[in-house]
Image (cartoon, rainbow, N blue to C red):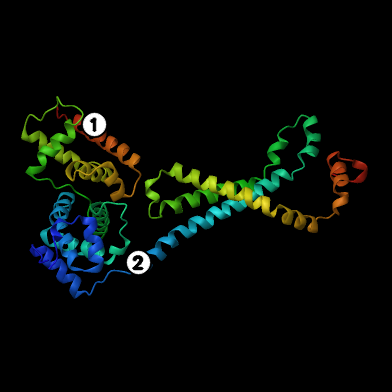
Amino acid sequence: MLPDIEHLSDEQLVIECKKDSQHFAVLVDRYVPKLTRYIRRRSLATSDDIDDLLQNIFIKVYRNINDYDSSLLFSSWVYRISHNEMIDWYRREKRRATLSLDDENHDIVSKLITEEDHTARFSNEEQKQHIIATLNTLDDKYKEILLLRFFEEKSYEEIADILRIPAGTVAIRINRAKKQLQKKITIHGTNL
Amino acid sequence: MEPTSNTTEKILAAIETKKVTPRPKWYFVLRNSSLWLPGIITTLLGAYTVAGVLYGILHAHLDRMGVYREYGNPIFLIAAIPLLWVLSFLLFSFISTSLLRNTHSGYRHTTLQLLLVSVASSIIIGVLFYAITQDTIDNQVRTYYRYPTEHQDQYFGEMFSQTPERNYP
């Protein structure tokens, strides 16, 4: 009987699963919903594609578990592997990264746009749809960083660890991404 | 622990079917060390070029070149800098910087920070190289020199004063 396994942190579970692989099942269980949502948001992958991607991601996580650096959050490490796996998948499938946002993400889009301007509000659903479409026209590196910051709610440090770039670069890139988004929205005549 | 979702179950089954096992710790230690190695080698090569630059400058006989300065050509000082060594140093510093970026935690630092670390390490080690090996280099240079050491000063003096009657250029 494993004592209070559910209450262990991710990092503790990693240490434990090096001794007993059963602990890995808890990690998989914890991250399947999060990564499914992440993959779904980042791509137009079908359910089968998502299953394949998740399988590849967790096989890599398990195979490389001894490479996990405890100075990182486990979630950052898993997201990094997922990010790389997604890039490989895009290359294999010859697809382009596409944000796929559903209704629950609309509030996040509002937050993204109005974060610095609290007076700005969306007046109708059409505008939100337009903003999501505009998000998809951004450069991939901007799209990815906005997704991690506003949809996955990662901190700058976590994003730096996931994308393997300095934290300062994360801040600059988010700023540029938001400017590019606002510029594109303005050009296309959506009044915020 | 029983898997709670169908997807988890499939993933765990795939791991079992494919007989996936964690790679041993030493594999990663070796791999991560191998990422550091090229960076260290290029930094050392950079240090070697720093020693070369120092040797070139400090043995350029600036005192004798002063003869040219009197003729209004101060640009001779640039000639005293061994450009090939300097260019090699810059090249190794840039290579070392990009190699350090690929290490495990290299991404946490900006390119400028990595470049500064690489350049500073090369300069410090280079100065040490020079301090340790200058006598050896000096001896080797003298061994292959056309004139014996005791005649060098006379030779340079005559050469820089461009004594036509002695057929110096």
Q: Amino acid at mark 1?
A: Lys
Q: What is the quadrant of residue A120 in the picture?
A: top left
Q: Residues within 10 Å of mark 2 (few under 14, many from 20)?
A: few
In this view, B20 is above or below B62: below
Left/right placement of residue A186 relative to residue A65 reads left
Quadrant where the C terminus of chain B lies?
Answer: top right
Q: x, y percentage for residue A176?
A: 29, 35
Check disc 2 and report the residue beneath it: B25
SS at mark 2? helix
Q: Which chain is indicated by disc 2?
A: B
> Mark 1, residues whose alpha carbon is within 10 Å: few (<14), some, or many (≥20)?
few
| Residue A190 visible in the picture | yes
Q: Are the residues tagged 2 and 1 within 8 Å (C-beta)?
A: no
Judge if badges 2 and 1 mark residues of a common chain: no
Q: CA distance from mark 2 to mark 1?
A: 49 Å
At x 25% / y 64%, what residue is drawn? A60
Q: Is residue B135 above or below residue A122?
A: below
Left or right for B30, reference A31: right
Q: How many numbered circles does the render carry?
A: 2
Left or right: A5 as drawn, with respect to B95: left
Residue A58 located left or right of residue A106: right
Q: Secondary structure at mark 1?
A: helix
Residue A93 in view here: no
Q: Quadrant of the N terminus of chain B?
A: bottom left
| Subunit bearing disc 1 | A
Q: Amino acid at mark 2?
A: Lys
Residue at screen point 58% across, 47% down: B124
Residue A183, labelled with which disc? 1
